[in-house]
Structures are given as structure tokens and as C-alpha cells.
Image (cartoon, rainbow, N blue to C red):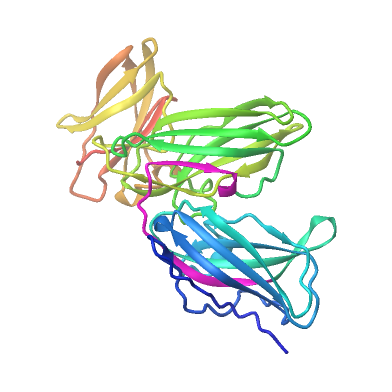
Amino acid sequence: MRVHATLNVLVLAVAGGVLVANCAPRLGAPTSAPPHVAVTADQVLASNGGARARIILRISAATEDLGPVSLFWQVALAGVDRGWHEPQYVSSAQAIDGVPAGESRTAEWLDTPLSLPPGRYDVSGWAHQVLAAGDTRHVAGGPLASIDVTRPVPSSVRLTQESFVVPNGPLALRTVTVDQDDPLTQHVSLAITIDNRADRPFGGRVYWVIGRFSDSEPFRTALWQTDWTTIPEIDAGASTSLVWQHSIGLPAGTYALSVWLHTRIDSTWEHSHRSFNIPIELRAGSDRIQRARPPILQGRVVDARPDPRGLVLVVHNDGPDQSVWTSHALVSDRRRFDWHQQTPDTMASARLEVPSGRSEHVLAWPLDCGSDVRFARVTLGAFDDVLVDVCS
């Protein structure tokens, strides 16, 4: 008997706030599976508004025995073509020793935490055959069902290893904790713990970025990012912890925060581990300032406002008196998110004498709020680089 790799879903309605997966069969796996192998779902459930998932996958062999395989599942934005190439979450893999012809085996993930913003998502299940030397190859899989996430983005989240991808190198994230005291201030605290899984010491570097949630490689077009933080050598089997606190400065919206970890091997930096995109909701603050990276604390722009004389810049200098070159240029509203990735054609320059403490400075140039050019980019020497809404 020929068994097709058609992916049907058995959905159980459970009381107590459980979101039931869309039970319509999802046909058409993205890659051809052998006709004697099928991956189906016994259960696809999301509970607590989409904060937890309960997934039971079944792999069946029809006319031929199937050797060792690994089963896993993914979550991707609904309706995205080839969404399995850019998943928002990938589960841990579970090993199946083998499946005799005519039989099936199951793998269970009974309480997996998910960190996703509200919306609809597609769940897919996959089987990879385990080959010699630990290599694998795809044998079956594809879409299973859809789930709806209704829980608002939390202001505080703590993620553990089951919420990260499989590490590539010796250094690995153990925990990532994101806290917002007040979304209006866009003040974000991030704490991470890093383990050295190797049998000898390794050092590394780490940074985090904020980008669009749908972007699987947000570091390429980051909307905001920190500089790299160097990690001194960690002894074999030991761990270290790091904490950041930053005010972000982005337009109001839902974004993705991700952490990227490199291991130093000899004289090169090798990608070692990363988190998935962690949703973070930023609300509109009271100031007019956007940033793409944290300022250097010795000198930073704390406020800016339009004035008949031009733009009034309020600077706070934690260090001694400074003489700083500042450059400024008008920026189109179309460049509101990627302004830091563009080099203005022309930028005016002026030298500012910035005393210690708080001071005000006037950048004298005409501001025309009647066009789409309602922003100004101001670079304060090497200290700060900001986008100012000069028309609000």
C-alpha cells in the first residue's frame, strides 16, 4: 500500500484558554518525500495566548524500514512563501532509532515556551535521516497547521536554551533575560549567561541588535545595535554573565531583539551561537530623538527642538570640557528607519565648545517642515549620532 506524505492534523479541543490549531489539512510539502515515509501531527496546541506549545509528531514507514531519524518542528510567519527557510522558532530535535515497515513512532514536545508577537503562524514538522559521521538529510516534512498568538508582547521575558538555535561553537547562550521598566522610556535591560561547553578555555565577543521581526538576519540591516563586547577567556565547563542597560530611541512599534555570540579561535572570530528573534514592543517616547546605537556616555544629545534660529541641541557631557566637531544634514521621512545606513550628499559642519555638564547649542540652518524632509541627522563628534524630528 502506498502512503503519501500528506500532512493531516488531529486537533484536540481543550478547555482553559487553549488556542486550537487550524484543523484544515495543509497539503503540499515543500520538498518531495519518499513515498514510504510520512510526517503527521497527532497534536498541535498553543496555550496561554500562544506562550506555550504542545506538539506531538508522528513518523510512519509504509513499505520499507526506515533507519535512524531526527524529528523537529518549526514556526514561521503565516502565508510567507518558503517560510521554513526563515523560521521564527525551531524546536530541539528528537532522535528516533528507526521505524519498521508498516509501523510509526512519535516524538513529544509537551510544554515548549514560545516568544512570538501577536499574529498567525504556520507550524511545520520535519524528519531528517541520520547518516554516518553525524550528517543528516531530509526525508519528509512540511506544513502541519496554523496557530494564533493573542498574548501581548510581555515587558519582561526570560529565555533558556530550548528557546535558542543549536550552538555552532564552544561558547553558547544559557539564558537571555529582557526587561523594560517602562516602554515609554524605551529603557531596555538585557542580561545573558554564556557557557563554555569545550574542554579548554575560550574567549569571544557578543552583541545584540534590534531589527524587524520578519528579518532572519537582522544584523545585516539592524535598526539599532550595540558595539561588540569582548568576553575574556572562560574556563572549560565554566560560565560568565553580562548585563546591558540602554535607552533605545526608535519609532513606536514591535521589533525583534536578538543576541549574537562569537568564539575566538586562534586569530579569527567564529560564529558560535545566537538567539531567535525576541519580540520587543517600544512605545513613542516624549523626546524627538532616534538612535541606531548607544551613545558614548561622556557626551550625548539629550534633547533637541526647533527654534527660529535653527535647531537647539541640548548636550550632556559627563567628562571635562570638550571641543567637538558636529555635522548635520536634513533627512527625508522615507529614510526614517535606515537613516544611519545612508551617507548624506551634503552635511554642514560646526565646532561646538561643550562644557562639562548640561549645555545648549544652536545649529543655525533653515528648517522647512512643509516638505517630507522633517528629520535632521546630527553627529556629535565620536560621541553620538542621532536623528531628530525637527517638526514635532
Q: Residue at x 68, y 28 (%)?
A: 238
Compare residues 310 and 213 and report the one nearer the observer: 213
Q: Residue at x 25, y 44 (%)?
A: 374
Asked whether, in this view, residue 238 is left or right of residue 180, the answer is: right
Compare residues 152 and 1 and report the one nearer the observer: 1
Compare residues 371 and 59 and report the one nearer the observer: 59
Asked whether, in this view, residue 46 is left or right of residue 250, the answer is: right
State the residue lying farthest toward the left.
308
Majority secondary structure of magenta residues: strand
Give the answer, above or below, for where 379 lies relative to 251: above
Quadrant assignment for the C terminus: top left
Which quadrant of the view contains residue 56?
bottom right
Please tell me how many numbered marks the rendered image carries.
Answer: 0
Q: Is residue 162 magenta?
A: yes
* Residue 8 image position (x, y, % from top left): 56, 78
Tell me the magenta residue range.
Answer: 140-164
Give the answer, above or below, for where 50 lies relative to 22: above
Q: Is residue 351 magenta?
A: no
Quadrant assignment for the N terminus: bottom right
* Residue 337 image position (x, y, % from top left): 38, 47
Asked whether, in this view, residue 359 is left or right of residue 99, the answer is: left
